[in-house]
Amino acid sequence: MSNGRRSPWLAVVVSCAIATIVIGFLILGIYLLDYWGWLDLGLTEVDYDNRIKYLLSATAQVLGALFALVFSITLIAVQFVTKYTHRTMRIIFNNKIIFYMITFALSVAVPLLWLMSPTWGGGIMAIVVGVIIILSLVPFFLYLRDSMKIEHVTNHLKDKGLRAFKRNDTDEVSRKTRELDLIGIGSLGDQHYETFGAAIEALFQFGLGIEQITDEIQSSSDDIKARKEIFNTLRDYCRVENPDPRTLRLLVENTGVCGAEAIKKRCLQTENDCINLVMHVRRLTLDKDCGIREENRIRLSVYSALALKTMTDSVPQKHETRKKELMEKVTEIFNDHFVQNWKDWLSTFLQITFDFLTKPDKYPIDTHEFWSRLLEHFFKYPVFFADHDMTNEATTASNKINKLLDYIRKERNLQVDLTKPFLDGLKLYVQKYFSKRGKVWKGWAENICREAVKLSKEFLNRKEHDVSLTALMVYMPAIGEHHITKETLRSMYPNFISQISEYITKSNKSVESDTTAPLVRALYESLSLEPIAFKVLWSKIETIILSLLKPQKASMELESFYSIYTDFTISLMRRSMYGDLKEQLSLENVFQFTWLVALRVEPIIMSTGALPKPIPYCYPDFKENDRENLTKYLNEFENVKTRFTEFNINGQRAEKLRKDIEDAFLKRWAKNP
């Protein structure tokens, strides 16, 4: 009955009434035929022993008692509904029911009439009519049960309003709107929320029905006025002082259902009205002074988001722009929960956002900008969970990230325009989770780092070098900041060095300026490798550092220049001459590398004036009287001259630097022969 259709039992009641009349007249006709002698059934025989008289008398009494009792109870029952609207009596006791009541009354009169001349025919007629009319009480009570439901009343008023609208009776339309509103207001006084829900559902359907009837709603001021009155009535429930949250919940739920139906039926104006009503409730949830407790405001916000989600799911796939607009509004409400620090329901929101990203058959992701915005919102969840130590929710978020990665890898075939913003989100995720204390958080971050290594390799194989560098940046800072465990680093670092080297050599591009500092810090980790492992990677490490120093490739920060110049180069020199790399590396190669670094970096640092003159650092730390190694070192200067142009090294300045180094050591040794 909630759909407003007329009770099917009414037809049965009316049929019983008609059957009573028809059968009564049929028996009367047979009686007359017998009376005139055309039939010989004995129906006209006189009741000499008064048995028929007693039967007729009892039948009349029973039917009379039933008539009084049934309709008295009916009137009392109807009064419980009439407190919301005086229209209930007329709705239930319509013309067909009045016809049934008249038939019932006539059935009482039949045995009374036959008492004047009791015959067997009259007794049979009274019994048959009485039985039929008594049996008809069953469908009558079923009809009464259905008709007394408030949904039947509200839908009846709505239907009458729509019929009045078709007749252009605007006054009647307004009256029906007010009557439905009065039902809603009256039910709130008794806290009868089911009745209130039925009233606002009818109001929504009323507004939707008006737009369906009208072909060009914007061309008729009466149509616009009628719909405006209806939705202003609905909006008034939000404007009362200290609104009841349950009232608003029912309002929002019905708004979502009506909006979805409006979308399916292409009723644009009703659709917009429903969206505006939901957004009005959304603004109310953000108002701390609205008179609603915070826990109720949170639930209202959730219902608002779910209402818009229901409407989103109803938009046909071909209307991509409209669907994306609604998806944006849904995520706006989700963002409210981050701003307000509302922790409840975030896992549900995360699932909805995940569905937005991974179900292109339902939710269109046709532009890089829209995909990026959704991803930016998606990664707010794991960051929020980390900020508030929500480990259970963080577990869910990590699982979703892995599933999203699998989706991008398999379904989207690692499309560059979709993967790059995803990698940016992974970078934020890794940084946040490595900053947390606890193995669980760091374990999740390390897992993503391992996946980023695989992604970078895949992009290098596809010659998507820019995206491969983005993948490397997911975990590169974690290496330099010592976040990754030694076990993970041991397996990850060779791949990292190989991929950076491959990126530089194959892409013919430099790393971006914001990448150099974390890259340099990550390169320091190579100094902690075992000698054999370092030897395997040395040529690639050398390629990376020298590429960073080339002026046509990139301009590093001064701090990075200085770090390579001092920490890395001097440490490498000492280890290759006297330390654990002495047997592993070619000393000539190390000397050439050292010269190139010193000649490229030293003038840049000195020209800035930001740091003290770093001449002592460019001198290799040769031990006393280590003339053989010094001679080798100075001789390697001649071998690097051919690369001066490549590194933009001033030849005269380089010669002077070489002479200064030689003179300085000669003077040192002269003092200590």
Image: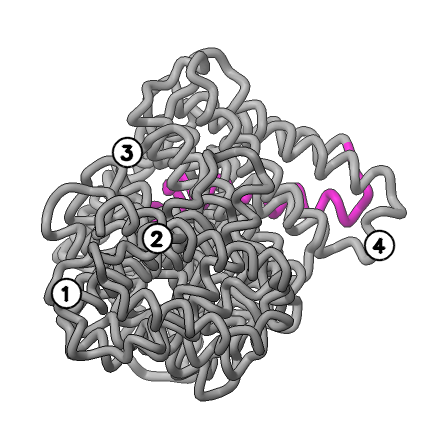
Give the residues in magenta. 143-170
Q: Considering only order in the chain, which callout, 4 or 1, is on the residue closer to the N terminus?
A: 4
Of tags 4 and 2, the one toward the viewer is 2
Q: Mark 2, mark 1: which one is toward the viewer?
A: 2
Q: Earlier in the sequence, mark 4 or mark 3?
A: 3
Q: Is the Cβ of the residue at disc 4 closer than 8 Å to that at disc 3?
A: no
Closer to the camera, 172 or 93?
Answer: 172
State the residue at coordinates (34%, 59%). 569
Distance of label 1 from label 4 (alpha carbons):
89 Å
| Amino acid of disc 2 | Phe
Indicate left or right for 346 with 368 as reference: left
How many C-alpha atoms fall within 10 Å of the one at disc 2: few (<14), some, or many (≥20)? Answer: some
Is 89 positioned to the left or the right of 159 in the image? left
Disc 1 vs disc 4: which is toward the camera? 1
Residue 216's disc number:
4
Whichever of labels 2 and 1 marks the residue nearer the N terminus, that label is 1
Q: Residues within 10 Å of mark 1 (few under 14, many from 20)?
A: few
Disc number lying in front (3 or 2) = 2
- Please tell me which of labels 1 and 3 falls first in the chain: 3
Q: Secondary structure at mark 4?
A: loop
The residue singled out by tag 3 in the image is: 73
Give coordinates of residue 405: x percent, y percent. 35, 71
Q: CA distance from mark 3 to mark 2?
A: 121 Å
Is 633 above or below relative to 241? Answer: below
Residue to which mark 2 is pinned: 665
Q: Amino acid at mark 3?
A: Ile
The residue closer to the viewer here, 217 or 661, is 661
Whole-angstrom CA distance, mark 4 to mark 3, is 49 Å
Q: Badge 3: few (under 14), some or many (20 or more) residues near its Cα, within 10 Å? A: few
Write down the residue under mark 1. 579
Residue 626 image offset from top left, x and y in percent:
23, 63
Describe the element under mark 3 as helix, strand or loop.
helix
